[in-house]
Amino acid sequence: MEKICQLLINNIKTIAKRCTSPQSSILSPQSLSESNNITKTSIVHSIKFRVSKGVTLIELTIVMLLFGIIGTIAGDIIYYAVISTKTSRDSSYIAEQGRLAIELMSRDFRIIRSNSAGDLFPNATWVGFYNSNGTGIIYSYSGSTLTRGLYPAPAQPLVQNVTSFNLYYFDQNGSLLASPVALSVYYIAVLMTLQKNDISLDFRTVISPRNF
């Protein structure tokens, strides 16, 4: 505003000089028009100058605050997306591993040659038997690994990330055998838990061997 006033004063002084000059004792319409144009142009330039000076501290603070809020929200979205993807991947992995292990055990148990003492060796965390082809098979749980071995070859890891593995044996009436004896076994139940990071899944099945 001070600059605008100063420009107006300067224009008034210019007009006054023209009025007192010998060459022009009165103001002509052309002079007034030129003076008005000069004044308008000066005011416009002054306004543009004031607008182009930049944003205020308050405006800058508001913009920074908005960017901070947007950044926080975007960070949370990305974080939860990563966690969700990781959780889904872990769940899919152990679900597939557990399913394959249960399917293989079910196939092997179904073709156990007999429930005689020489063909079946029941235990709570491991079981050995001969199948109908005469092949010796051993399932054993130790640490966090369930292994499967074809006798007399060394056992191979079947599934990792096992937190619990138990075998239960039932007689022909469906009663649980506290101390299983081969001749009394008619059903074998498998209970297994797999865990990866925070994801834990349980797997269970009951098998009735064909030759029992």
Image (spheres, rainbow, N blue to C red):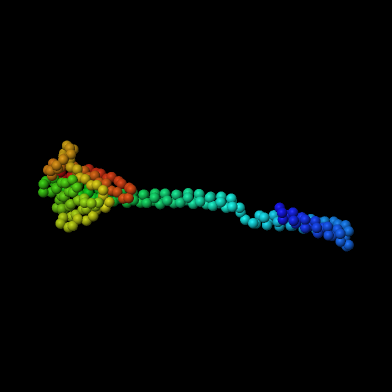
Q: Which quarter shows the C terminus?
A: top left
Q: Residue furthest bottom?
A: 23
Q: Position of residue 4 (x, y in %)?
A: 73, 54
> Front-most of 37 and 162?
37
Q: Position of residue 115 (x, y in %)?
A: 13, 45
Q: In the displayed structure, would residue 168 be above or below residue 159?
A: above
> Front-most of 206 and 57?
57
Residue 99: tell me if it is visible. no
Q: Residue at x 51, y 51 (%)?
A: 68
* Quarter holding residue 48: bottom right
> Front-most of 108 and 56?
56
> Front-most of 108 and 19?
19
Q: Residue at x 26, y 52 (%)?
A: 160
Q: Residue at x 18, y 52 (%)?
A: 138
For the image, the number of numbered tags is: 0
Image-based side of 73 in relation to 85, left or right: right
Residue 199: tell me if it is visible. yes
Q: Position of residue 105 (x, y in %)?
A: 22, 49
Image-based side of 38 in relation to 58, left or right: right
Q: Residue at x 16, y 46 (%)?
A: 123
Q: In the displayed structure, would residue 187 be above or below residue 3?
A: above
